[in-house]
Structures are given as structure tokens and as C-alpha cells.
Image (cartoon, rainbow, N blue to C red):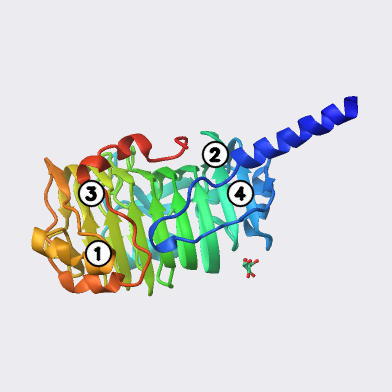
Amino acid sequence: MRSSIVVAAFAAFISSVTAADAVKGAAEGFAKGVTGGGNAAPVYPTTTAQLISYLKDASPRVIVLTKTFDFTGTEGKVTESGCAPWGTGSACQVAINKDNWCGNYQPKAPKVSKITYDKAGVLGMTVGSNKSLIGQGAKGVIKGKGVRIVGGAKNIIIQNVRFTDINPAYVWGGDAITVDGADLLWIDHVTTDLIARQHIVLGNTASNRVTISNCEINGATGWSATCDGHHYWGMYFTGSSDLVTLKGNYIHHTSGRSPKVAGNTLLHAVNNYFYANSQHAFEADSGAKIVAEGNVFQNVKLAQQASLAGKMYNSASATTNAQCKAYLGHNCVPNAYGTSGALTGTDTSILASFKGKNVAAAGTAESAKNVVNTAGYGKI
Ligand SMILES: *[C@@H]1O[C@H](CO)[C@@H](O)[C@H](O)[C@H]1NC(C)=O
């Protein structure tokens, strides 16, 4: 009798754990179909070493974070010289002299004789294929180290996790999410704040199909390359063959690279809320193709840099918006602006690149104003 009650209670416990500690929803847009760790039984790391091991091993895994994993100090500290290319004021970031970067690229910058940074931040944890990394409620916090998805890793979901406090005073002190050679990646309801360099970077190698949705890119910082409390190094997408859906994200208190798009990247930026940007949001080098629709720009000095080399289509007119339907499956949706510079791209030649792909739906810019309430970790 007693044992059957225990068995029943245990079974109920197992099923409730499985139901709660699972990926929620499904990816929209280019990474549609991603499954991450799939139905693997959830694992609950308790130490930073265990988290590192679960992320990189060869097994499909659903890795559930139930607390803050603090990596600061786990690899020691480094003290060395650096430079101050953006000025020596206390609100300015200082650069680590990584690979003699100061000497090679900033020879005129004032030298800084002694800076001390945390070594764990510099290189993220390697993530293998077939992994889901998820936070439980608002508990999933990774402090002082990011993740690296490289070398052909495939089918990965990161959902409901906050990455924070990665050497924020020092450029080259680390990224939150580095991708360089991957496929089928979904980054959802992730918060990044107080990061040294890039919040999200899709590097030179092909990242293939990526969806970044419902994330909060929080650039508010005491140390910035623009020395004004706004982080410059937001998102950089520069893969050799990248399809990136950027939907429903709250991107705020940045001053550049929000995002920077280069390489051979097709970007669908839809229903994002850009707020309080002291310089510019979009940068686009030659090779970039961007469709931006249904976004809100509020207090964004420039929605884009002047005379972009890349190609952009920005809901130019009702007539050209209707041309979207044949390729994106819907008419393109106007963006909205409040006390902001506007996007100017009218290049309809790039619309055909979306044909036959999984394309995210687009709501109105008015509906995207709710993104401030839904984006980031701890909300699902
Ligand atoms: C990931 O899962 C797929 C599908 O089950 C499988 O073919 C592939 O070998 C897995 N990759 C790794 C590295 O385990």
C-alpha cells in the first residue's frame, strides 16, 4: 500500500518535471524544425564543471538551469596592459591587448598599463549538437561566461536563460553567444546584459539557419565604447551563408551594431522593438540582404547608418509591400518610428531570396510595442 503510493507520487513527480522543464513552443522562421535535445530526460547540473560537460558531450541533452552558475574566478584572473581607444573617461570601455590588437589597430590610443579581467569570460563554453539549454522559471542565469557554437554543431536550442557580467569594462573580454559554423539554432527568450564584446555574434563561417526570437539585448552599461552608458557591440551577423530570423526582440540602450549585418547574410528583422539607441541600429556591409518590417524604433537616433553598402528592403510603399507576398508569404508590414531616424532601403530585388524558405509571420508595428513585456528570460 505504502509503496504503491510512493510509486504513484514518484510517477507524478517525474511527469511534472518533464512537462515543466522542456522547451516551450517552437521556432518560427529559418530555424523552424529545430528540436535541440528533443525528448532526452532533463539533466540538472549543479556545478559549473557539470554544466560545461553536459553542454559539450556527444549525447542529446535537455539541460535545465535551476540557479545562477557563476564562472567568475573559476579560471583565475589576468593582469596585463591594454589601451583606451575610446578615451580614458570612467564611462569608456578599455581594450585588452588581445593578439597585440592595441599595437596593430590602435597605435595612437593611450596605453593603459594595468588592467585585470576574469579569464573565464574570454572564451565561451562549447555546445555540441542536439542540445537544449533552458532555464527553470527565472532561475537560469549564467554569469561570467558565454557559449560557443562552432565547428558544425547543429540543432541547438537556448531558451529562457540570462547571460550576464562577462568582463563588461573590457573589450575582448568575451561574447555572450558566439556562433561560427553551425546549423539549426534557436535562441529564444534569452537576456544578455553587461557583456564585454558581442551580445550575439555569427562569425565568418556559415551559421546556416538561425532564429533569434523574444530576446532582450540590454546594452545599459557603465562602460561603453561610446562612453555614454550604451553598449556599442550588440549583434554581428557575418557568416558566409546565413539565414537569420530576428523576431520579437527588445534591443535597447545600445549605440551600434544593433545589428551589424555582413558576409552573405539574409536577415528577416520583424516585429522587434528598438529603444534608446544613442547612435545607430542597422549597419550593413556589402553582401548583406535585409528585410525589416513591423519593427518599432523609439528614441533611436538613427535606425540605420547613412549610405549602407548592403541591400535593404523596408516596407517602402503599399505597392512594393504587396510584392513581398510571392516570396515571404505575406505583404510586408510598415515599421513605426517615435523620435527616431528612419530606415530608407527600397531594394525589392532581395525579396526573391526568401522564396521556398520558412519565413516568420509579421504582425503590425503597433503589436510589436508589447515586446517590452514579453522579451527576455523569466517570462515563460
Ligand atoms: C544529432 O541527432 C541527429 C538526429 O537524431 C543524429 O543524426 C546526429 O548524429 C546527432 N548528432 C550528434 C553529434 O550526436
Where disc 1 sits, the SS reads strand
Q: Amino acid at mark 2?
A: Gly
Which dot, 4 or 2, sits closer to the camera? 2
Dividing the picture into quarters, in which one does residue 242 lie? Answer: bottom left
Disc 3: which residue: 295
Whether residue 199 is visible: no
The label shown at residue 5 is: none
Nearer the N terminus, badge 3 or badge 2?
Answer: 2
Q: Position of residue 130 (x, y in %)?
A: 60, 61
- For label 2, count other residues whose C-alpha is less than 10 Å away and answer few (under 14), some (14-19) or many (20+): many
Quadrant of the drawing holding the N terminus: top right
Disc 1: which residue: 290
Nearer the N terminus, badge 1 or badge 2?
Answer: 2
- The answer to whether the residues at label 4 and label 3 have Cβ atoms under 8 Å apart is no
Q: Amino acid at mark 1?
A: Ile
Write down which quadrant ligand 1 falls in: bottom right
CA separation in Å, label 1 and label 2: 32 Å
Disc 2: which residue: 140
CA separation in Å, label 3 and label 2: 28 Å
Whether residue 143 is visible: yes
- At a point 41% along the width and 66% down the height, the residue shown is 203
Q: How many marks?
A: 4
**Direction top: furthest residue:** 2
Q: Position of residue 281 (x, y in %)?
A: 22, 52
Nearer the N terminus, badge 4 or badge 3?
Answer: 4
CA separation in Å, label 3 and label 1: 13 Å
Q: Amino acid at mark 4?
A: Glu
Which dot, 1 or 2, sits closer to the camera? 1
